[in-house]
Image (spheres, rainbow, N blue to C red):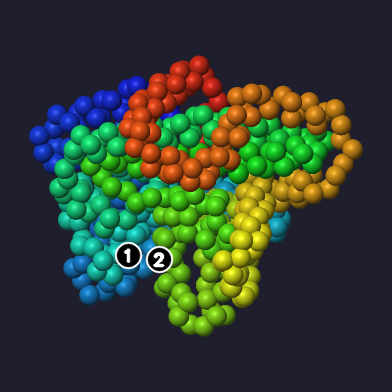
Amino acid sequence: MVFSSITFLSLFLPAVLILDRICPNVRFKNAILLVASLVFYAYGEPVYVLLMIASSLLNYIWALLISRFRAKKLFLTCAVITNLGALVFFKYSVFLTTWFNTSFNTLIPVPDVTLPLGISFFTFQAMSYVIDVYRGDCKVQKNYGRLLLYISFFPQLIAGPIVKYRDIEAEISSRKITSEQTVSGIRRFACGLAKKVFIANNVAVIADAVFNASSASVNLPAAWIGALSYMLQIYFDFSGYSDMAIGLGLMFGFHFKENFDYPYISSSIKEFWRRWHISLSTWFKEYLYIPLGGNRKGKIRTVINKFIVFACTGIWHGANWTFLFWGLYHGAFLMIEEVMPKKDRKNALMKALSHVYLILVVLIGFVMFRCDSIKDFGIMLTNMFVPSAKGIEASMLIMSVLTPINLTALVAGVVFATPVAQKLKKNKYLEKASYALAIIAVLFALMSLSSGSYNPFIYFRF
């Protein structure tokens, strides 16, 4: 079940909201949210919901053992191994076995496993809880139901943001839900839904048409339009989902941290990763980069540590060479930026050139991210930078997807990838009107979804 679905919007969410509001205290509210979260996950994963429950139980036990016995490091090591082991098995066993068979001409049976939805997210959440208990950053949760609610809570279960237990620990035990908070949550959810349905879904039509087309029908303009469309699709798809998750959290009394901060206005890869998928980058910073030594052991070690982190970031995204090289690609540019002289931020020309540099690097990176293989990436890159004589077939491809609706979504994506909406909010009249616009956006989204419009979701792959 996804947030941008008729089932969720017209049945699941209203039912859970009503039940939550009629519950007399937090204990009953938690029970309702826990059952709802398990139903939400089981709707798409009727078998793997047991895996999530088992993972939560195992991490609950590891944290208890860490809190009660002296062999804390041993239990922490066991927790990390079991969590990463499950992640490797379900996400990478098919890929690794196939690669090994191909590379060494062996006949090892390929495991018949499918990827559980959201496993990367709920595994990282569970790991952060156990590590924080070990570090003393949060108290051990002795109530398994509360810990299971934290890990399985449906707003952030499938695609994040990755929420640390210490950030919502108090709200699991005690929270107050006001009408202002609920309305703000609905508005935030509507904003994310609009991003997803009206921008991401429509530019996805353009991106998919270009990336799925044969090389013979993609010329230089088509390749750039497709690359730009995917760059906008992944941002509005993922940031829209994060907005919806944050809005849902508010409706139920939880405050999640921001996950995106207009990353495409950045002027360096370092700044981009402070603004893009913030919960993932901070997770790697806290639980990998700093333990490796961070920037405390000299320039060379700092560069190496960042490179390791971004290799792991690529691997986290999935079992494909394109993800690994995408992570290494970003790591390489971070290494370059680390050793380059600092630029003059007051120089307007340098700021403009830095922004162009960032957009080009990120766009090419996302082309790699989107392609199914390194070979496909090479073909797409060639189409983007080498002019060709491809004629009518390439023209027909672009004309078929650049409909008025898709073109409008493309332009809107470029505009709203900047903080223009934040500036509009400062107008008190527009601020008041935004609540009415939120309701209108939800109604139009429902009409669009009920008509069977294209509704892909990128981060189901992870």
Do the numbered discs 2 and 1 sit on residues whose CB atoms are within 8 Å? Answer: yes
Provide residue 118's location: percent of width, then percent of height.
43, 44
Give the residue at x 43% y 39%: 424
Q: What type is the residue that disc 1 sits on? A: Ile
Q: Is residue 99 above or below residue 428?
A: below
Q: Which element carries disc 1, helix, strand or loop? A: helix
Give the residue at x 63% y 38%: 229
What residue does disc 2 label? 287
Q: Farthest bottom residue?
A: 298
Residue 131: give its label: 1
Give the residue at x 52% y 72%: 305
The residue mark sitting in front, 2 or 1, is 2
Is the residue marked by circle 2 packed among few (<14), some (14-19), or many (20+) residues within 10 Å? some
**Split into 4 quadrants, where in the image is the N terminus?**
top left
| Image position of 443 (left or right of 234) | left
Sequence-earlier tag: 2 or 1: 1
Give the quarter of the image for residue 300: bottom right
User: 213 or 414: which is nearer to us?
Assistant: 414
